[in-house]
Image (cartoon, helix red, strand yellow):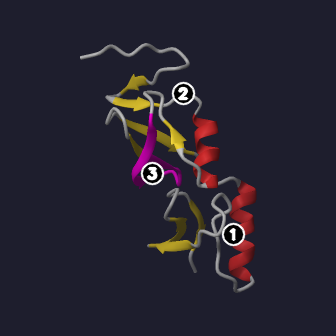
Amino acid sequence: MTSLHSDGGVAAESDRRLTLPNEDALLRLYYDGGRLPSPAGGFLVVLGVRPEDDASASLLLECTSSSLRYELSVPKATRSERKRVRTLIDEGGDPKCPRHQGEFLVRIRHDFACSSCGVRYAKAK
């Protein structure tokens, strides 16, 4: 087993899951539809999106060159993002994800959420 160092260029292990350095830059790339570089070389592939109870989400990622798996936390919606979505719904339009360009929100139980990032934005009426 290789040891992981907690410096800026290598992922740190916490609770048996690897976290990524510079998550904010990776999130911006993900929202724009870009390829996510892996700290181990290669690129990261999204295996799944896991919504959390607090309206945030986690992305499960795998490196294409090393098969290491990482977790990327996606923060919950801001007040302005929720307001923008609620305005679209009240006007009768189809709500879109404020973070992903052109991605429509889907109804999950009583909420509108993005299927790509897992964030819940508004309550469905």
Up-down relation of residue 77 to residue 97 (above or below): above
Up-down relation of residue 44 to residue 6 (above or below): below
**The N terminus lies in which quarter of the figure?**
top left
Closer to viewer: mark 3 or mark 2: 2
In percent of width and height, residue 123 lies at 58, 71
Residue 59 disc label: none
Question: Label 3 vs label 1: CA separation?
Answer: 20 Å
- Tell me the kind of residue under disc 3: Glu
Question: Label 3 vs label 2: CA separation?
Answer: 21 Å
Residue wearing tag 3: 52
**Crowding at label 3, few (<14), some or many (≥20) Cα neighbours within 10 Å?**
some
Q: Which residues are magenta?
A: 42-59
Counting residues from the start of the chain, the first of labels 1 and 2 encountered is 2
The residue that appears at 50% across and 58% down in the rendered structure is 118
- Tell me the kind of residue under disc 2: Pro
- Tell me the kind of residue under disc 1: Val
**Crowding at label 1, few (<14), some or many (≥20) Cα neighbours within 10 Å?**
many
Magenta-drawn stretch contains 53: yes
Residue wearing tag 1: 85
Residue 110 visible in the current orientation:
no
